[in-house]
Image (cartoon, helix red, strand yellow):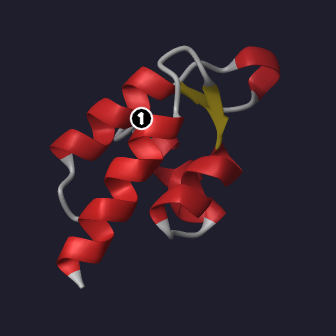
Amino acid sequence: MEELNNRKQHEMLLLIQDDDLLSTSQIADLLGVSKETARRWFRKKYIESVTPVGHFRLTGKEFKEFLMWNRRF
């Protein structure tokens, strides 16, 4: 099962461009967590974000770095 998760994660990383801006919903879907969990991570600065028009966003590059440092995903 872990191998499957690693393969899916690798495929996901290949599709995300460094300059893509990912929404809270997209991040939640990609990580298999609730939107509220993703929002909480942004608010607590577990994930650094860009906030155009008051909405949390994360660049593809920052998302990949987050995944590399948080091995549970």
Image x and y of residue 21, in percent? 63, 25
Is 60 positioned to the left or the right of 72 in the image? right
Of the 4 image quadrants, the one containing the C terminus is bottom left
Of the 4 image quadrants, the one containing the N terminus is bottom left
Above or below, 45 relative to 17: below
Q: Residue at x 20, y 41 (%)?
A: 68
Number of marks in the rendered image: 1
Above or below, 56 relative to 3: above
Q: Residue at x 42, y 37 (%)?
A: 14
Q: Amino acid at mark 1?
A: Phe
Residue 51 in sight here: yes
Is 21 positioned to the left or the right of 11 in the image? right
Q: Residue at x 61, y 62 (%)?
A: 36
Q: Residue at x 50, y 70 (%)?
A: 32
Image x and y of residue 44, in percent? 41, 42
SS of the residue under disc 1: helix
Q: Residues within 10 Å of mark 1 (few under 14, many from 20)?
A: many
Is 59 positioned to the left or the right of 55 in the image? left
Image x and y of residue 45, in percent? 39, 35
Outermost residue, right direction?
53
Please name the residue that numbered disc 1 is placed on: 63
Is 3 positioned to the left or the right of 64 in the image? left
Residue 73 in sight here: no
Closest to the observer: 28 or 9?
9
Image x and y of residue 24, in percent? 64, 46
Tell me the quarter of the picture where residue 9 sits. bottom left
